[in-house]
Amino acid sequence: MKNSWAFLIMAAGSGQRLGGQPKQFRLLGKRPVWQWAAGAARASGIDDVILTVPPERLPPDIPSDRVTVIRGGETRSLSVRNALRGTDASWVLVHDAARPFVSPDLCRSVMSAVTECRGVIPLLPVVDAAKRIREGESVMSSVDRDGLMMTQTPQGFHRESLLDVLESSSPLVRDEAEPWLASGRELTWVLGETENFKITTEGEWSMAQKLATTGATVRTGVGFDVHPLVPDRPLILGGVSIPSPLGLDGHSDADVICHALSDAALGAAGLPDIGRLYPASDETYRGADSYELLRDVINRLRNCGWGVIWADIVLHAQIPRIGDGVEDIVNKLECLWNDGRRRINLKVKSGEGIGPVGQGEAMTCYAVVTVTPC
Ligand code: MG
């Protein structure tokens, strides 16, 4: 996978076909329409998210937490040019703000096929019989739909190449693929997604509302971790230091509860696991405070639009006895949210004297986390 990607969300259009507030700024569920795509971008591994907006919506109107807000131009092409100049990423995905249900998988599939001279776009075949009508005429003609495709976003390009193309083309293009093709460059495609539709009509707006409030309102993730018990290591569980002659061994502080909980939360949000986000091969994480990594995980989820509503944890440990520490661990974990709502349930099971846990050689932990859009 190439690194240095930016995700450009085009939200500078007037978008007033639905009347009132431009559709990309309407609330869909609890978030503005454009924020949904920002969440998908982050879940696909892109942190550099750029939002182009009409000049009257420049900050402080837009919360700019982890989003670079850029003034849009009079046309889409001019807005894209502004956004391309607003990042130094090597590669870009250009996306319509009014397509909130783009998936991280689609982003990744476009990203993996882009090269310096090849752009990539998602296409969906036209499945209905097609007709052509001309304004003011009552007659119509049939159109052969064979090979006819509908274009979606995100469209992926090499940033500087796209800037070259747009600077030497008409500002009145409908998407980035159009001038890219006209410049004679290579353009290829991946299969788009039906749910990645563009909200343009009232019918599409109500369909989006149904999807936002029913489809994936609750998701779950599961996490597991194991660490060996050794002498001369501190025993840290759920961010709490437990008095013990033995501690868990690992690259970080080996907090088996925070690790299982982090992986469960990341899994629920469809994000990469902690091994990929905070690799043991990275010296930065030697002796790392896993409670703080869990705090970072929760922030990552929030930035992708997910909030943890419940976590059920099973700690499998024979020695030392943890029973007295359970309340402290639960309280410490609840502090990560600090909003007075209960979210954590922790059970400790002994190893019954068998296996590595029962023999006091290791501890394991299982966690299930439930999230909803926030
Ligand atoms: Mg671990």
Image (cartoon, helix red, strand yellow):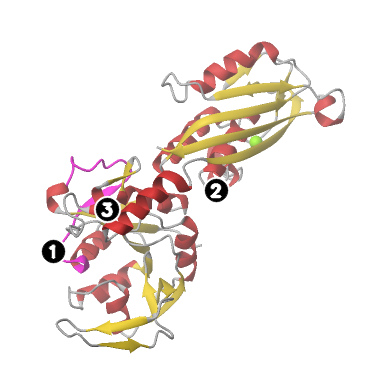
Rendered image quadrant of residue 286: top right
Q: Residue at x 69, y 26 (%)?
A: 315
Residue 180 visible in the snapshot: yes
Q: Amino acid at mark 3?
A: Leu
Say the numbered circle drawn on residue 74: 1
Q: Of the two numbered discs 3 and 2 on the same chain, state the one appearing first in sequence.
A: 3
| Mark 2 to mark 1 CA distance (whole Å) | 38 Å
Say the numbered circle drawn on residue 51: 3
Give the percent coordinates (x, y) of residue 350: 78, 22
Give the percent coordinates (x, y) of residue 6: 36, 57
The residue stretch that appears in magenta: 58-77
The reply, left or right, for residue 50 in relation to residue 271 is left
| Mark 1 to mark 3 CA distance (whole Å) | 15 Å
Give the percent coordinates (x, y) of residue 79: 20, 62
Q: Amino acid at mark 1?
A: Glu
Q: Is residue 337 above or below residue 193?
A: above
Residue that numbered label 2 is attached to: 272
The reply, left or right, for residue 229 in relation to residue 55 is right
Is residue 74 a member of the stretch shown in magenta?
yes
